[in-house]
Amino acid sequence: MSKRVCIVGAGAIGSLYAAHLARVAEVYVFVRRTEHARALNENPLRISGTHNFSVRVKASHDPANLPSFDYGIVATKATQTEEAISKVGHLFDDGAVLSAQNGLGSEEIIARYTRGFVIRGTTFMSGTRHSDTHIQYELDTATWMGPFEPAHTPFSVVREFADLIVESGLKAEALEDARPAQWSKLIFNASVNSVAALTGLPHSPHFSDEEKFENLGHLLHALIDEGKQVAEALGVKLHEDPWEMNKIGAQTNHPPSMLYDVDHKILTEVDFLGGAIAREARQHGIPAPLHTALYRLIKGKEASWSYQWKPLHAA
Amino acid sequence: MSKRVCIVGAGAIGSLYAAHLARVAEVYVFVRRTEHARALNENPLRISGTHNFSVRVKASHDPANLPSFDYGIVATKATQTEEAISKVGHLFDDGAVLSAQNGLGSEEIIARYTRGFVIRGTTFMSGTRHSDTHIQYELDTATWMGPFEPAHTPFSVVREFADLIVESGLKAEALEDARPAQWSKLIFNASVNSVAALTGLPHSPHFSDEEKFENLGHLLHALIDEGKQVAEALGVKLHEDPWEMNKIGAQTNHPPSMLYDVDHKILTEVDFLGGAIAREARQHGIPAPLHTALYRLIKGKEASWSYQWKPLHAA
């Protein structure tokens, strides 16, 4: 019998999961906008680029229209996890939910709203969203998945879900411990996103330039080293070296999501990225002055968008 | 016999010096724009606000039209010191030149272009520039002046110039050592300007808010403490506590000059502010990770204004 899967949030990543899984399972998509649900119900979801196909999915913005599920994938921005999962968490009480989101802390939120198993996930997949029903698939990398420890998720559950994702045509890898992969990406992402958001630069060659004293490459190196020290102090061995990831990424001019967010004055994911490193470090008494400084600057930048001021003149 | 004084750069601060000194000395103003010189030659320079008067000054954008001087005040942005003083430095070979600029490093540049005495200066005077010939005088605080050590400037020269400034109606104080005042303002200015430039906030209550972990007040406190440690390691005792200066300033919503600069994509003074602290610290083997990090971020932001990019898509 076919498995029933719900994708929570259909941005580029959520839509990629939905379309692929719809070829091997019964897929529903839970979205925020009614027009988005209508567009998906009335038209096939089209994938172009690395893979090329169109497929039908069922979509709804109303939890009352959704059945219970074997599997879920939360693919909203980390800032929207709570709003989304609080409405549909109960539909996974007999299943398992994977977080395919940026940073640290989403699994904890998901676990508060479902009695089902929770799976730690990390992915580097990327795509460009051309419309509600057309996504261009770009980077096809594995989804690394592992048990979320506090939920006592059995490894067999992780492996079965990973098998289904592989069967759908995407890459996935079940890991006994997904934290090394998650922390590698967290350190990379926190460092690159914060610097991009504060400078206005995409992930450009500046990020690995260490020639002159003032060059940004020194700052990236220091941020990444600091992140590695936090991971090591927490007993997490990294899956990949974030500095090597940064050197490769710095050749792409890719605009990190947080750069898009600040350009459009949208609340960033910093609480789940640099802010998560800063808080983990603080909680365990590990110094992380640079991630903490950049975290506070980005929170200050967010505050500036709504701050109404006029100068008070002396004299 | 009346002294001859040249004001180099007639923004708000330069114009305030020029107008006041023109009441007790023969004042020339060296400016960059021909229209600015013409406006000043054809109209009186008007001061309103804290003081109210109009006065005639002579202005030129051409060094060939300027005589030699007893005193000079360089009041350009620190980024424009070299361009300006390289053209007129020789006119002060038998006189003394005061830097009334932000940050650290302008005196060194001035000393390269004149055989005259060089005077370290720091001022908190402020004004709003309504036009080329009308400045509103706001904060009337002292100009702190002292010998620039490498130029072996006699203290008597500093005192005589300070006396002339006081006679003109402004506040001035001759100090045997002007570095404590300069470093107090440097640490304050470097910390507040960098955070304002990176967050987009004016000098607002956020800057002294230390209630929550993410609040900017913690960052300001850490930046100021780091600056104090650098000053102490260099043997400079501070004139005022920059943290107290920050707490007062945070009630004003004053937009620091670097915020204006980044909003208008104008090269900032960061090399003379946070960058100067970072370089001094590095040169003397003192750690200054936070000022160094913010310095690199602002240099990255400046680089972003001219960086042409398009994303390189994988696949």
Image (cartoon, coloured by chain):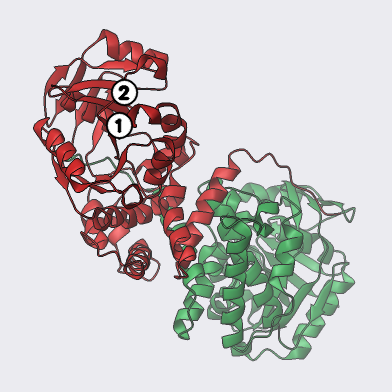
Chain colours: A red, B green
Closer to the observer: label 1 or label 2? 1
Q: Amino acid at mark 2?
A: Ser
Q: Are marks 1 and 2 on the same chain?
A: yes
Number of other residues with Cα within 10 Å of mark 2, as a class: few under 14, some 14 to 19, many 20 or more: some
Counting every numbered tag in the picture gives 2
Q: Residue A276 — which label? A: none
The numbered mark 2 sits on a residue in which chain?
Answer: A
Name the residue rendered at 20%, 39% in the picture.
Answer: B313
| Label 2 sits on residue | A68
Q: Quadrant of residue B104?
A: bottom right
**Secondary structure under badge 1?**
loop
Q: Nearer the viewer, residue A76 or B30?
A: A76
Residue B184 vs A7, above or below: the answer is: below
Instruction: Specify few, some or many for label 1: CA neighbours under 10 Å numbering under 14, 14-19, or 20 or more.
Output: some
Q: Judge left or right: residue A96 versus residue A52.
A: right
Q: Chain of mark 1?
A: A
Which quarter of the image is occupied by the C terminus of chain A?
Answer: bottom right
Residue sitting at x 70%, y 81%: B238
Of the numbered discs 1 and 2, the one sitting upstream in the chain is 2
Q: Amino acid at mark 1?
A: Asp
Identify which residue, B93 or B286, lies in the foreground. B286
**Res. B64 visible in picture:** no
Residue identified by numbered label 1: A94
Left or right of residue A26, residue A37 in this image: right
> Is disc 1 in contact with disc 2, using a CB cutoff of under 8 Å?
yes
Determine which quarter of the picture holds residue B87. bottom right
B41 relative to A99 in the view: left or right: right
The outermost residue toward the top is: A42
